[in-house]
Amino acid sequence: MEDIDLLKRRLVREKTARLQAEAILEKKALALYNANEQLLHLNENLEQQIRNKLAELRESEQRYRQLIESVQDIIYKISPTGYFTFVSPVVEKLLGYTEEEFLGSHFTDFVLAGYRVKLIEFYRTMMAERQDSTYNEFPVVAKDGRVVWIGQTVRLIEQDGQALELVAVARDVSDRKLAEIELETTQTRLETLITNLQSGVMVEDENGRVLLANQLFCDLFEIPLSANELVGYNCTLARQQVKPLFVHPDAFVDRMNELLETRQARVGEEISMANGRILELDYIPIFLDDNQYMGHLWKYTDVTEKYQARELIRRSEEKYRGIMNNMELGLFEVDNDQIIIRSYERCCKMLGYTEEEMVGKNATDLLVPAEFVAVVERQQEERQKGNAGSYELQLIKKDGSRIWVLVSGVPILDENGTIVGSMGIHYDMTERKQLEHELARAKRFAEEAQQAEKQFFANMSHEIRTPLNAIIGMSHLLFDTQPTQQQREYIDILKTSADFLHSLISDLLDMTKIEAGRIEIHARPFDLAGLLRSTQKVFQMKLQTRPIAVDVLLDTRITDEFIGDDVMLNQILMNLVGNAEKFTEQGKIQITARITKEEQDRQWVEFTVSDTGVGIPGEKQDMVFQKFKQVNPHGFKHKGTGLGLAITKELVEIQGGTISVTSQVDVGSSFTFTIPYIKSLVPAEQKNIDKQLTLVEELKTCNVLIVEDNLMNQTYIGSLLNKWNIPYTMASDGKQAVERAKSQRFDIILMDIQMPIMNGYEATVAIRSTQNPNQNTAIIALTASAMLDHKSVAMEAGMNDFLTKPFEPNQLLSVLQRFAPVEQINSEGCILFDEALDRQRLSELYGGDAAYASEMFSIFLTDIVPDIRKLPSICETKDWPNLASAAHKLKPTLAMVGLSELEEKMRQLENSARQDKDVDLIEEYCHDFMIEMDKVLPILQTELQKLSQV
């Protein structure tokens, strides 16, 4: 029951609660309805507002787009990573790309390659530093390849502190940029021009400030600033500071101020500086097109040298104007038709006319003789070409007499440079012409006298030397007849007297040759030490009965051979030692030789010949080298001409040397001379008795033709050849010689010059020019004449050498050996070449084929040597490729003539020229090569001569 009550109460409570809930629900439903109605109303209003706002937004966007499209600048947006998100349509107009080609592309795709990194850094810096707005210019590449300069303003858009995007407005600034570049280029050129001008330049603005200057301007005015540091400097202050540098300081400043006030251009004003320099001032004001003054340019040029030259010319003109006024020179002017338009006073006096009588007349008709008209016409043609000229001619004076004048003619030009006439300066040279005529006549007489003197000496030489040759020769032969002691003494006296007479004649003829400049130097390799010892032995034998010692002291460096005239040196030593022997009673004679200077292959050798003789007084030492002077301090009287020392001095100086003497009375004398020689690579010929005997043996197969008209000389030469067992044939004149030459082959022809019927010259020409077995045989002239021109005539006639009478047996033997055919083939059948050449190489090349070797040696000397001579000139031009090519071409030819060492030197020269690394080394190689080549050329020529005789 209780349960039912509980249940009922619960039902009542639930019912009550439900009713309450329904009441609340109804109330809430009503409120919800009302709210829903309000919401519907609000939603309708909101939709209307949205529609309104969207319409406003579309209208605003349309206006914005129209605005963007109407703007000529490019507006674009890029993401922080650099990709385009928006670009205005104008981009297509400016760059040729469409919007679609830009959108999604990276900005670097359009920037010129060299500016991409720079622009990326610009954007990075802007975003890193959160720069709100920036400006930048850079070049982009348009679609058609054009380079367009863009100037852009960029804004950074941020949201919540993060970079959202970059918005930029860009425009085409190419015209301005190109103008700026051109302006900058022009300014750079101007600055470079001004900087390098040979004048001091300064540009000043309208406010008196320095805009531009060069360093020379600062240097001229001793301004302690650089040209850049001077920019902006106050010019008024600067002028005050530099005015002490001028001769007239205040006048300088006043003139500058005057130019600034007038603003008128001035060029070429000269200003004197206190240090003596002269400056030339140019002032150039600068105006714009609207005549607006913008400053001025100062230019200062140092014209000191030009000024001094002008002053020198001015003073020279004044000087020569004065000279012309005071000299005896006649001057007149003519027009192009030779009509005299003016004649000066001195000219009128010279010709005897007044000016009125000359003006208006034709100069040629009035003054010039008929035979000189052509001369004047040729000179007139030169004047019409604008050329000056000098010439000589005669002029006819008013009285009909003639004078010789030297004319200097020049054209006369008007202000336009047109030739309107000419002017002639006339110098009266009548007296000089007369003197020239007299001098010419005197010269002709002198030449005739000189020729007569030469002929006299030639005749005297021949007439005396011919019998003297026989006397000396016979004295030599008499020694071979086993004479008695008394006969030997008589022969000695005969030989001594003949030698003295020979010496006298030789001295006279030597001096004649020296004075006429007709003496020759024959340079060849010789043994200097051997020559000095030979001289020592000669005088030791001569003085062996007298208490006089003959010593030789040699420099230890005198070991090799030298190239020079050993015969001339021997004559010098013989003269000096012989002179010492004359004036020395006892003691010694000493010959000293030492090297005093060395330059490459050239050495200066100093020789001293000293004695303990009577000496020479100091006041007479200057006389010893004079002709025909003998100095005998104690009354000594010695035989001689007084020419020995004079000849010695001339012979030393001919060789480029000097000679001097020091002496003390009763103590002795020392004669010192120095001669330059070249060191030889070729050994000098060793002369000894054994070799002479060998030569005589070799000559036994030689067949000689002797052409001599003098019986004594025939006997002398024939006896010598008989002694040497050399076969010979004798001819008494040139005609017989020619006949013998036609019928028999000879190895050598000894030809006298002066003979009856046909002389030696004519006979030689006949033998050389006709077909006969001896057309190429060596012909040796035998003559008593020692004149050099006679030797030249002999060589021109076709002779090979010259042997002067009287000659000693060994001289004749030497000539025979030199020209006689000798064996050139060794035991193995190979040609025996000179030791200075590469014998092994030559033997491999030629073996015993002398004809082939002769042909190659001849080609080398004729064709290759001239090409070698060109190497120094190529070296001087420093044309190393051409030098290397020439050396490469010439190198193999050296081996063909046995010059293996020179071939290696040529290889060094070629390699150095190709590498072009050391100019001095190349030039040294070239110089050394040419020196060595000059040394071996005589050897090659001798070898060719020997080969042609095999």
Image (cartoon, helix red, strand yellow):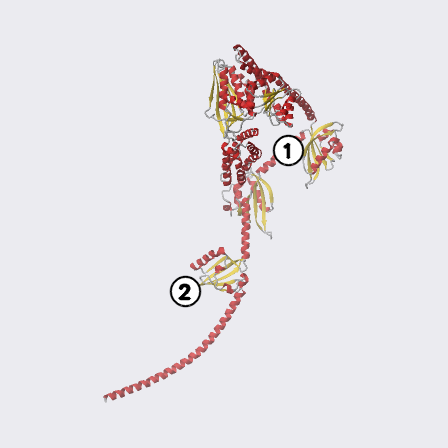
917 with respect to 27 (left or right): right
Image position, residue 85 (x, y; %) = 47, 64
The vertical placement of 297 against 363, above or below, is: below
Q: Residues within 10 Å of mark 2 (few under 14, many from 20)?
A: few
Quadrant of residue 384 within the rendered picture? top right
Which mark lies nearer to you, 1 or 2? Answer: 2
Screen quadrant of the N terminus: bottom left
The residue at the point 60 percent across, 35 percent down is 311
> Could one spot residue 238 in this view of the protein?
yes
The number of numbered discs placed on residues in the rendered structure image is 2
Image position, residue 303 (x, y; %) = 58, 39
Return the residue at label 2.
160
> Could one spot residue 625 in this view of the protein?
no
Secondary structure category for the residue under label 1: helix
Kind of residue indicated by mark 1: Glu
Q: CA distance from mark 1 to mark 2?
A: 97 Å
Image position, residue 695 (x, y; %) = 53, 23
Image position, residue 763 (x, y; %) = 64, 24
Screen quadrant of the C terminus: top right
The residue most toward the left is 2
653 with respect to 385 (left or right): left
Kind of residue indicated by mark 2: Asp
Return the residue at label 1.
318
